[in-house]
Amino acid sequence: MYSLLLHGKRRFVDVQKWPSLIVSLNLWRNAASSSASGVSDGLKGKNFTVSYLVDSLSLTKKLAESISKKVTFDDKSHPDSVLNLFRSHGFTDSQISAIITDYPLLLTADAEKSIGPKLQLLLSRGASTSELTETISKVPRILSKDRSLTVYYDFVKEVIEADSKFGTLCLPKRGKQENKIRNISALRELGMPQRMLFPLLISNRPHICGKERFQESLKKVVEMGFDPTTPRFLEALRIVMGMNNETVQEKVNVYKRLGFTAEDILVMFKRFPIFLALSEKKITRGFETMKKCGLLEDEELRSVVKMFPQCLGFSEENILNSVETFLGLGFSRDEIAMMVKRLPASIGYSGETVKKKTEFVVKEMSWPLKAVALFPQVLGLSMEKRIVPRCNVIKALISKGLIKSELLPPLSSALVCTDQDFLKRYVRKHDLDEEFVAELMAIFTGEMRTNK
């Protein structure tokens, strides 16, 4: 399959293998101790962490809550010392915020014994303050490294400088990290952006650290037409490196027995590379389960799988429960088939999710069931972030007589469209009434709730 639809030749960098790198023990010890508290202490620590991040770094509450899922603390001595250390070394508040957002475990590190000596080491090698702050801000996780710290730091610095001048890199000639850096350099030559390259630097995944298969696998992924500026490129590289030709051919044969052509398989691989790593049992069971539902003809089913190969990973129970829930809500089999063809992911939604969203839209808002069948995308939207806030705006407009309850706008216009289009259609058109627009915006952002 890898030989299909080739796209020309590229230059590749020779690679060498290197072993896994050593992770800083101090960070992990402190992180483990911070998560070993009881349930009540954990909740207290989480609340304290959120407040601290909001007050000390001016982070939004939403971002602070996200970070608190990765690290918590109930005392500010450690985080204060870490923030003060960064500030004393010339890091700006925005850089510190970026560092902590990317690598929050640093807040539990020992500033004096762990982080401080590493910053001093880099400065002692001739790094300027501006260079140090920019480089660490780009990849703060290199501070988790000990022996490899300077090698990784130099590489990140060179990439930043080379990208700003459109120059080439001077790669290390020896050392345990040479193979990984050469691999990442090869990806950079293909145009992979820094935001994707730098996380790979501190990763120990085999498809980045490997040697023998990297160049061959990279060539295959490029020739299949994957875009190196997207995460899907790395997914494909990982799958290709992890499977030998014999295994790939076995998987291709499984799909061919289900009626897919080689071209179909390549299209599916480009949409969802992981689908090739599914077991033969899972592939066959997923396809046969959807077939057993009796909603689609064989060719229609293959079209659905080709459009959304992820559906082969759905469990039999999930698929059957989803169909049963749709039927229980009053959808006809033809309507379910139409929804699956328009939104293949819907056949894998949990019954609870389908029921909750459908009942809200139909019973709470009075849209007809047919509207959901025509625009099943609504079932993939977040209740809290999309459906409820927008419906609350619609309710406010109804209460003012600006929309008639019996003439609701189409679901596509109210829920499926972008935020920008929604605000233009239902909020900003009332700009002459500034107070009402402010009220609608408060409802839209969740700062104000409407009465049912």
Image: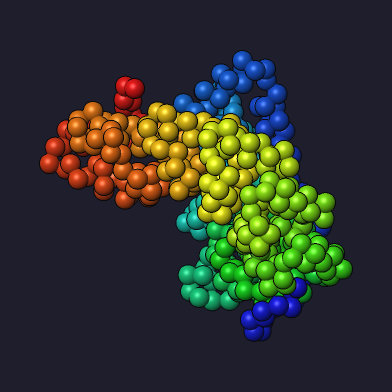
Camera-nearest residue between 65 and 147: 65
Q: Nearer the viewer, residue 229 or 385?
A: 385
Quick one: which residue is furthest to the left in this view?
432
Above or below for 106 versus 251: above
Tell me, yes or no, if residue 310 can be seen here.
yes
Q: Quadrant of residue 309?
A: bottom right
For the N terminus, which image quadrant? bottom right
Q: Measuring from the top left, give residue 29's x and y in whole percent.
A: 72, 33
Q: Could you tell me residue 18's position as x and y percent? A: 80, 62
Depth check, front residue: 141 or 132:
141
Left or right, 185 with respect to 166, comes to right
Residue ID at (82%, 55%)? 280
Instruction: Please tell me which residue is depicted at 66% across the width and 51% down the height of the picture.
Output: 311
Is residue 417 rendered to the left or right of residue 26?
left
- The residue lying at 61 percent from left, 15 percent from top is 40
Task: Compare residues 299 and 171 and report the one nearer the observer.
Answer: 299
- Quadrant assignment for the C terminus: top left
Q: Is residue 80 visible?
A: no
Q: Looking at the image, how many numbered discs can be counted on the residues?
A: 0
Position of residue 86 measured from the top left corner of the image (x, y, whole percent): 51, 42
* Colour scheme of the rendered structure: rainbow
